[in-house]
Image (cartoon, grey):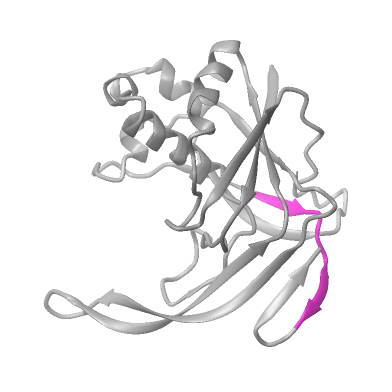
């Protein structure tokens, strides 16, 4: 297996609601999920690389490079996460008839003070080359408008400090549920315009953070 990382600097507030959240109330993840990162790579491969026909192929090698990559994270000690509580106006479908109506929803927007390092583990140099070709072109994760600036690649990334939750180890931190592509996922199953059922795997991750300040409108983690 081969490891490398892509380092990004958040430039705006970040928001990506947990997949099991309701539309009316949604807490945000602190980091882009592996699922959202892989979807961002797919978006670049299609819109910039013109690889749609290759990705759609049965047993596509290019799609396999994206799906099979294992993603973990390293958060520098200097980083802090300020979670801002907000009520926003959204549109929701009306229960009877067609159309939408305005309503109020709870959302969280996260200020990330420093860079984050996204670590990839792949099985071959070809996979690394394919992912690297599009990673540096990505400019947002999560909700559109949650911008990130690519900084650099690192061929010798540190050990990830965002770990899978293990009740036996009793690691302290913030627990969040993150989505990833299912190991048997196909391009059709992650295609937003397909009728196929979306296949996702879930993992509880422990972020090495603790609360250092809070009020009714924000919570600060470091």
Number of dots carrying numbers? 0
Residue 192 sits above or below residue 175 on the image: above
The percent coordinates of residue 56 (x first, y second) are 29, 25
Left or right: 186 in relation to 102? right
The segment highlighted magenta reads 204-214
Residue 124 sits above or below residue 156 on the image: above
Residue 199 falls inside the magenta stretch = no
Magenta stretch prevailing secondary structure: strand
Left or right: 156 in relation to 37? right
In the displayed orientation, state which residue is furthest to the left: 97
The percent coordinates of residue 24 (x first, y second) are 43, 77
Left or right: 95 in relation to 122? left
In the displayed orientation, state which residue is furthest to the bottom: 216
Which residue is at 64% across, 48% downward?
9
Which quadrant would the N terminus be assigned to in this image?
top right
In the displayed orientation, state which residue is furthest to the top: 125
Task: Please name whichever residue, 49 or 27, is drawn nearer the observer in this view of the structure.
Answer: 49
Q: Quadrant of residue 108?
A: bottom right
Which residue is at 34% across, 24% downward?
55
Task: Please name whichever residue, 61 or 96, is drawn nearer the observer in this view of the structure.
Answer: 61
Q: Quadrant of residue 209?
A: bottom right
Which residue is at 30% across, 34% downward?
188
Residue 206 falls inside the magenta stretch = yes
Which residue is at 49% across, 54% downward?
142
Which quadrant would the C terminus be assigned to in this image?
bottom right
The percent coordinates of residue 152 (x first, y second) are 66, 32
């Amino acid at each position: 297996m081969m490891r490398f990382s892509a380092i990004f600097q958040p430039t705006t507030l970040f928001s990506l609601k947990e997949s099991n959240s309701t539309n009316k109330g949604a807490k945000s993840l602190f980091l882009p999920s592996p699922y959202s990162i892989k979807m961002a790579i797919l978006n670049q491969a299609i819109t910039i690389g013109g690889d749609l026909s290759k990705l759609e192929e049965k047993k596509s090698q290019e799609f396999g490079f994206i799906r099979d990559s294992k993603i973990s994270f390293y958060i520098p000690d200097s980083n802090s996460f300020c979670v801002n509580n907000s009520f926003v106006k959204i549109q929701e479908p009306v229960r009877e008839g067609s159309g939408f109506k305005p309503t109020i929803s709870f959302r969280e927007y996260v200020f990330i003070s420093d860079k984050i390092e996204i670590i990839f583990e792949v099985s071959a140099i070809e996979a690394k080359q394919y992912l690297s070709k599009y990673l540096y072109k990505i400019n947002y994760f999560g909700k559109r408008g949650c911008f990130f600036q690519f900084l650099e690649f690192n061929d010798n990334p540190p050990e990830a400090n965002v770990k899978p939750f293990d009740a036996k180890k009793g690691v302290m931190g913030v627990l969040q549920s993150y989505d990833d592509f299912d190991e048997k996922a196909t391009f059709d199953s992650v295609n937003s315009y397909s009728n196929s059922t979306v296949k996702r795997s879930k993992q509880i991750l422990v972020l090495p953070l603790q609360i250092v300040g809070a009020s009714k409108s924000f919570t600060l983690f470091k």
